[in-house]
Image (cartoon, coloured by chain):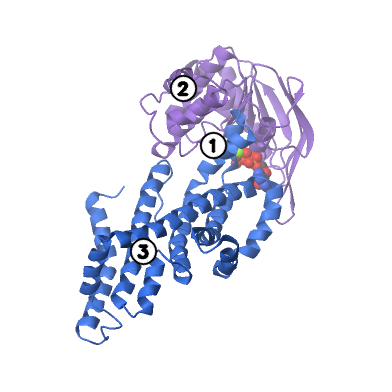
Chain colours: A blue, B purple
């Protein structure tokens, strides 16, 4: 376990490149190397950010984005884990699902978006569907691989103790595969953040992605940066929350480097 | 009673090569008997135990327990694996509780029994630690407690004391004998230590190098309850150990399969 001061150092080192980027950005804007109409000063963006975050209208947009993000990610987690476990548990499911996954996983899901819009409409459902379609694969693959790699003696120990096949799957195989499953979920979470933004940029009347496109159309560069920074901070926050949950769930597992 | 009848096992490896591991093993173990299996590394001792446990199917032959053919695991046959196989996400208490919960024991009773077992394997006070926080010997003791929890009448133990220091090993051997004298479980016990096999067993089964066949079965005619100190000075004990060690040497020097 790392000492507290060690964690502070790590955070500091991690913040360095970000500070560097902001610094370069500041210099570019301040010296006029980049015209303000294209690249606003970081201070201007920061001021706007603070202003927007206290504006109910802006927060409503952020809430729509978060709602789609959570709904899509949540469905992807449930479906990905369920299908992933089933692939390992049943030869039949494995034989039917595996080729399907191989074909679908590399398809750029954004290509399905028009079809989602046609079937599900312009509202939340089509955006959530796109998030699910993109986030489900890493979770499914990580779950299938993780559960297949579980030491058989763990399952045997459970079966000898009287656990049925199902019991064994849920109380031993899935928990044993949790490190792998959670790695898949983390990738799924990052993808969800990207995809929800993308979907909102393509067609939407609300959400952070929509705000960015709207600002871009009217050349309001400051307003373009605000949703961008908001989603990246949200991603950072979600990742931190995810890590906290992960540490709790994996308390007994040997520590892994991240 | 366990009856192993003409059991053979051939593994199919990834590249479709056939790997014979066990060859025509027949062995009957009486109820309440303590039988040890000795043999060179890789001769199929673990595999034989897995087949009796119902975890692995034999390629030929069959195992019956009390006249019933083994087709899968059952709480009547409790394994203790060479690699412990503890649940890493459960604490010591959680691991020992697992079998009790599967047996439908009420929570309060299960807790009491689990604590009792943990105390029996000298781990009281360690209930809330995770396996990764335990030493090898402690993990092994948790694994034994976890299996004893659901009261199997047959114990299938795969080198349970192999990773332990001499002192802990002796202590656990005595504990195991105590349990066995009290509950008269049937024990199938794999070990690499001739001394351990002779000390514990009613009969010692020796196997040839891979693919494993039965080499010789030696009945250990020593009085019980046994005390290690007394046995070490006992000429008959020494004779058994030396005799079996010779036998093992001749097994090792046999032509490679
Ligand atoms: N799942 C498997 N697939 C293929 N071959 C296997 C498998 N399990 C065991 N074997 C082979 O079967 C043989 C016997 O293995 P086993 O683990 O039973 O030996 P062992 O007597 O327990 O050895 P040790 O004393 O080292 O534990 C070995 O040659 C091994 O390579
Ligand atoms: Mg072995």
How many C-alpha atoms fall within 10 Å of the one at disc 2: few (<14), some, or many (≥20)?
Answer: many
**Callout 1 secondary element:** helix
Label 3 within 8 A of ligand 1 by Cβ: no
Q: Are marks 2 and 1 on the same chain?
A: no
Secondary element under disc 3, as helix, strand or loop, is helix
Give the residue pinned by disc 3: A231
Q: Quadrant of residue A200?
A: bottom left
At x 31%, y 69%, the residue is A226
Q: Position of residue A41 (x, y in %)?
A: 23, 77
Q: Quadrant of residue B202?
A: top right
Disc 3: host chain? A
Q: Is residue A199 above or below residue A147?
A: below
Q: Which residue is mark 1?
A: A171
**Residue found at x 51% / y 27%:** B146
Image position, residue B147 (x, y; %): 55, 26
C-beta proximity under 8 Å, tags 2 and 3: no
Viewer-closest of A93 and B201: A93
> Of label 3 and label 1, which has the lower sequence position?
1
Label 2 chain ID: B
């Amino acid at each position: 376990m790392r000492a507290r001061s060690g964690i502070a150092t790590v955070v500091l080192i991690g913040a360095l490149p970000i500070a560097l980027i902001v610094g370069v950005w500041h210099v570019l804007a301040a010296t006029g190397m980049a015209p303000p109409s294209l690249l606003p000063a970081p201070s201007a963006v920061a001021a706007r950010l603070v202003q927007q975050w206290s504006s109910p209208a802006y927060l409503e947009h952020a809430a729509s984005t978060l709602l789609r993000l959570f709904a899509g990610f949540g469905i992807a987690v449930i479906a990905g884990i369920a299908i992933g476990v089933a692939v390992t548990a049943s030869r039949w499911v494995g034989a039917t699902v595996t080729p399907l996954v191989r074909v679908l996983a590399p398809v750029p899901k954004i290509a399905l978006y028009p079809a989602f819009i046609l079937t599900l409409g312009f509202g939340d459902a089509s955006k959530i569907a796109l998030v699910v379609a993109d986030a489900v694969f890493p979770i499914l693959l990580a779950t299938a691989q993780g559960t297949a790699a579980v030491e058989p003696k763990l399952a045997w120990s459970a079966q000898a103790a009287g656990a049925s096949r199902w019991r064994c799957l849920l109380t031993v195989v899935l928990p044993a595969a949790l490190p792998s499953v959670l790695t898949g979920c983390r990738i799924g979470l990052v993808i969800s953040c990207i995809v929800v933004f993308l979907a909102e940029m393509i067609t939407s009347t609300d959400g952070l992605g929509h705000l960015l496109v709207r600002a871009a159309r009217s050349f309001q560069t400051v307003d373009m940066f605000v949703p961008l920074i908001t989603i990246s901070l949200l991603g950072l926050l979600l990742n931190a929350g995810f890590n906290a949950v992960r540490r709790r769930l994996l308390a007994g597992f040997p520590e892994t480097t991240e | 009673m366990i009856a192993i009848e003409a059991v053979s096992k051939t593994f199919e490896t990834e590249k479709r090569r056939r790997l014979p591991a066990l060859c025509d093993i027949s062995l009957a173990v009486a109820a309440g008997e303590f039988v040890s299996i000795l043999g060179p590394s890789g001769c199929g001792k673990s595999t034989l135990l897995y087949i009796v446990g119902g975890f692995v199917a034999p390629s030929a032959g069959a195992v019956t327990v009390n006249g019933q053919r083994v087709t899968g695991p059952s709480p009547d046959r409790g394994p203790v694996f060479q690699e412990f196989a503890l649940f890493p996400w459960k604490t010591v208490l959680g691991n020992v509780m697992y079998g009790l919960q599967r047996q439908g024991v009420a929570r309060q009773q299960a807790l009491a029994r689990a604590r009792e077992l943990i105390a029996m394997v000298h781990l009281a006070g360690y209930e809330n630690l995770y396996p990764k926080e335990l030493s090898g010997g402690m993990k092994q003791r948790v694994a034994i407690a976890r299996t004893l929890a659901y009261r199997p009448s047959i114990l299938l133990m795969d080198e349970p004391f192999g990773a332990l220091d001499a002192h802990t090993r002796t202590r656990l051997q005595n504990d195991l004998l105590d349990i066995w004298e009290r509950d008269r479980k049937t024990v199938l016990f794999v070990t690499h230590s001739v001394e351990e096999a002779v000390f514990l067993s009613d009969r010692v089964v020796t196997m040839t190098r891979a693919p494993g066949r039965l080499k010789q079965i030696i009945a250990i005619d020593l009085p019980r309850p046994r005390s290690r100190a007394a046995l070490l000075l006992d000429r008959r004990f020494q004779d058994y150990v030396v005799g079996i060690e010779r036998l093992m040497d001749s097994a090792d020097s046999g032509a490679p399969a």
